[in-house]
């Protein structure tokens, strides 16, 4: 049986975190980019640090200073760092922490640092619309997972997550047609921005695990 990686991202409420931790998932994502409506405040960060979360935690950053990332890590132990901007190989490696690097997929040709993709613990494929990188709630053209040679090279490593507009209505199509190694879902499981719908979370995980079996 092949297991599909599931990352639930954009959690910012204590109850949502505790519930997510009870599900059969692999990673929990916390966003530390202030521009995001799912940003985890310093006050909430301290509350989260006191919780007994068992799933690996991923801290999501975008073009932020080394000092800022280290400040967050000093408060909360992060199992992975996710870099969602234009961070360099040297920057990503400097923290000596496993990291996830985002490849932004829009209508144009896909470009990324091959060295970064090879050194990352995982690569995240996410939607880029105009100047917005991720958090759009829209999916990219999934046919690129088959047709784009650059993406296929990463897919062959088996270390990648598909993000961007995933929800209960389209997840079966993605699983059956493209057989992704991993999934990263956020807005598609919310009833309000930054507030998770527990029924949708459970249904999403059940659909993926039923597919796995």
Image (tube, rainbow, N blue to C red):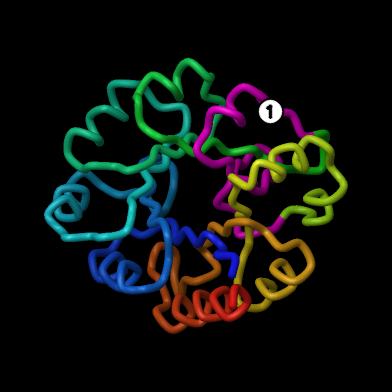
Q: Secondary structure at mark 1?
A: loop
Residue 135 against residue 21 in the figure, above or below: above
In the image, farthest residue toward the top: 90
- Which of the 4 image quarters holds residue 71? top left
Q: Is residue 7 magenta?
A: no
The quarter of the image holding the C terminus is bottom right
> Picture coordinates of residue 9 (x, y %)?
44, 57
Snapshot quadrant of residue 75: top left
Please report the residue visible at 53 percent of the width from the left and 61 percent of the height from the top: 185
Closer-to-camera residue (15/158):
158
Residue 197, compared with residue 125, is above or below; it is: below
Q: Which residues are magenta?
A: 110-139
Quadrant into which the N terminus falls = bottom right
Residue 196, how many percent across, how many down? 40, 71
Locate residue 127, reporting x and y percent: 67, 48
Circle 1 residue: 112
Residue at the image position 25 percent from the left and 71 percent from the top: 15
Residue 158 image point, x, y percent = 63, 47
When the figure is inspected, residue 142 is found, relative to residue 152, above or below; the finding is: below
């Amino acid at each position: 049986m092949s297991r599909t990686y599931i990352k639930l991202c954009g959690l910012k409420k204590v109850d949502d975190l505790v519930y997510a931790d009870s599900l059969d998932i692999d990673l929990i994502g916390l966003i530390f980019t202030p521009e995001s409506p799912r940003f985890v405040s310093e006050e909430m960060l301290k509350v989260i640090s006191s919780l007994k979360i068992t799933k690996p935690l991923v801290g999501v950053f975008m073009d932020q200073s080394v000092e800022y990332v280290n400040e967050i890590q000093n408060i909360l132990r992060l199992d992975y760092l996710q870099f969602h901007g234009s961070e360099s190989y040297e920057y990503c490696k400097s923290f000596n922490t496993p990291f996830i690097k985002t490849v932004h997929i829009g209508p144009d040709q896909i470009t990324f640092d091959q060295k970064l993709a090879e050194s990352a613990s995982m690569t995240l494929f996410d939607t880029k619309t105009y100047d917005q990188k991720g958090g759009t709630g829209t999916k990219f053209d999934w046919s690129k997972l088959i047709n784009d040679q650059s993406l296929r090279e990463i897919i062959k490593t088996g270390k990648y997550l598909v993000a961007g507009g995933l929800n209960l209505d389209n997840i079966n199509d993605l699983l059956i047609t493209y057989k992704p190694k991993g999934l990263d879902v956020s807005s598609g499981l919310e009833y309000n921005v930054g507030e998770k719908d527990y029924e949708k979370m459970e249904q999403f995980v059940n659909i993926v695990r039923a597919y796995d079996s």
